[in-house]
Amino acid sequence: MDDRQRIVELRLDRDMIRWNADIQREIDVAIFDLKESNRFRPLKPLIPDPTGPYHAHLAIRDRQLLIALFHEGNAADAVDRIALATSPFRRLIRDYFAICESYYAAIKDASPAQIEAVDMGRRGLHNEGSEELQDRLSDKVEMDFDTARRMFTLLCALHLKA
């Protein structure tokens, strides 16, 4: 793998978003982990043969996930702008939010076995969303599964304000 085909900086569109502490922690971990290790290569860039590493800006606009990629140190000229409809994720995100609420409630007073059962369901939905994201972006971006998992976490967080 070419070490330049990766995201080294990531910014979320945070216009008037106030996440609770649990969600903010999930976002911070996803961004940290993504910056530490990811594979992200645009397949149909706006410019020929772009080389990374990239800075990425994620936003939700008009029910679309927008990913803008820039060269490191050049925030003016986009290497690529990727748009993905979020409507196919609506059920998954709703179900994921519901099971996350159950998980956070369970960790307060449920037995370890109950917490583990809820967490397994949460991870299963997260994996399903990650696979769906990876599949729907497969003609636009090459990324590994761990990168897709972190991006799905961020898609969910951005969806809270959409």
Image: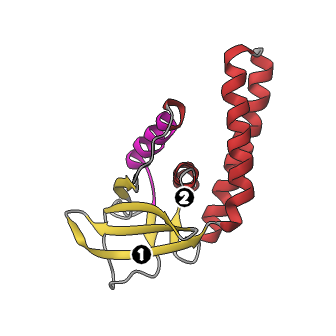
| Residue 36 locus on image (x, y percent) | 39, 45
Q: Which mark's residue is nearer the viewer, 1 or 2?
A: 1
* Left or right of residue 115: residue 10: left
Q: Is residue 105 above or below residue 100?
A: above
Q: As shown in the figure, which amino acid type bears the numbered disc 1?
A: Arg
State how far apart marks 1 and 2 are (Cα). 19 Å
* Left or right: 126 as drawn, with respect to 41: right
Q: Which residue is mark 2?
A: 144
Please tell me which residue is depicted at 44% across the width and 67% down the height of the picture. 67
Question: Mark 1 — residue?
Answer: 81
- Image quadrant holding the N terminus, namely bottom left
Residue at 53% from the left image edge and 37% from the top image edge: 23
Type of the residue with mark 2:
Asp
Residue 142: x percent and y percent? 51, 68
Q: Is residue 35 above or below residue 112?
A: below
Q: Are marks 1 and 2 in contact (CB under 8 Å)?
A: no
Membership of 80 in magenta stretch: no
Q: Tell me: 57 left or right of 120.
A: left
